[in-house]
Amino acid sequence: MRFTGWLRTLVVVGVVGALAYATLSAVLQGPPVLTGDPLTTHAGYWVGPGNYTEISGEITGGDYVIGNYSSFDPVGMEVEFVVYNSSEWSSFVAGGHPSPVYSVSTAFSGRIVYSAPVTDNYYFVFSNPYPSSSHLTFGIYVATEYESNVGDDGLG
């Protein structure tokens, strides 16, 4: 009888310990990070003269994307960078004159800090401003991170 009592106690303590470990590890690790988020990237892209490359994905209103970009081969080539929402992207692809929701001055490198006002698909477009006749293809290195606006309240 005593053995059964000790065994029950051991099982209860083990279960309580396992639950405590699972709860504490989840709290300490924070929210899960989605892998494969298209707006979290570290990559190089080749852009021909008069062409563009883009990364895109849904941003929840209030969330933001931070990062930077720079031309790397040859170094110092100017890059045009703009962000379009889904309706302006359609106009851009159709060859219209869309209004970007975010843009920076043309430069060989720049910082990206974009906070989405509403939930939508956003397109981060990197363009080669040189005409096709220039034959100036260059590489652009882009590093971005999608950040959720839901965070620690500082009380913990």
Image (cartoon, rainbow, N blue to C red):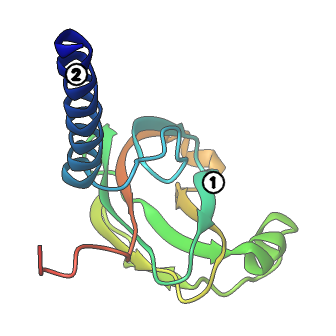
* Count of numbered tags: 2
Residue extending furthest toward the front: 1
Foreground pick, 143 / 7: 7
Residue 129: percent from left, percent from top: 53, 61
Q: Residue at x 63, y 47 (%)?
A: 133
Q: Which mark is residue 50?
A: 1
Residue 41: percent from left, percent from top: 42, 44
- Which label's residue is closer to the chain start, 1 or 2? 2
Q: Is residue 34 left or right of residue 9?
A: right
**Vertical side of 145 occupied by 72: above or below:** above
Find the distance from the CA under tag 1 to the CA under tag 2.
79 Å
Foreground pick, 96 / 85: 85
Q: Quadrant of the C terminus?
A: bottom left
Q: Which mark is residue 110?
A: none
Q: Quadrant of the N terminus?
A: top left
Counting other residues with Cα less than 10 Å from the Cα at mark 2, is it few (<14), some (14-19), or many (20 or more)?
Answer: few
Q: Residue at x 83, y 71 (%)?
A: 90
Residue type for callout 2: Gly
Q: Quadrant of residue 9?
A: top left
Q: Is residue 56 left or right of residue 31?
A: right
Residue type for callout 1: Gly
Q: Nearer the viewer, mark 1 or mark 2?
A: 2
Report which residue position mark 2 lands on. 5
Q: Are marks 1 and 2 in contact (CB under 8 Å)?
A: no
Q: Is residue 101 left or right of residue 109?
A: right
Q: Is residue 63 left or right of residue 89?
A: left
Counting other residues with Cα less than 10 Å from the Cα at mark 1, is it few (<14), some (14-19), or many (20 or more)?
Answer: some
Q: Residue at x 57, y 85 (%)?
A: 101
Residue 73: percent from left, percent from top: 33, 35
Q: Label 2's element?
A: helix
Foreground pick, 118 / 82: 118
**Vertical side of 104 occupied by 65: above or below:** above
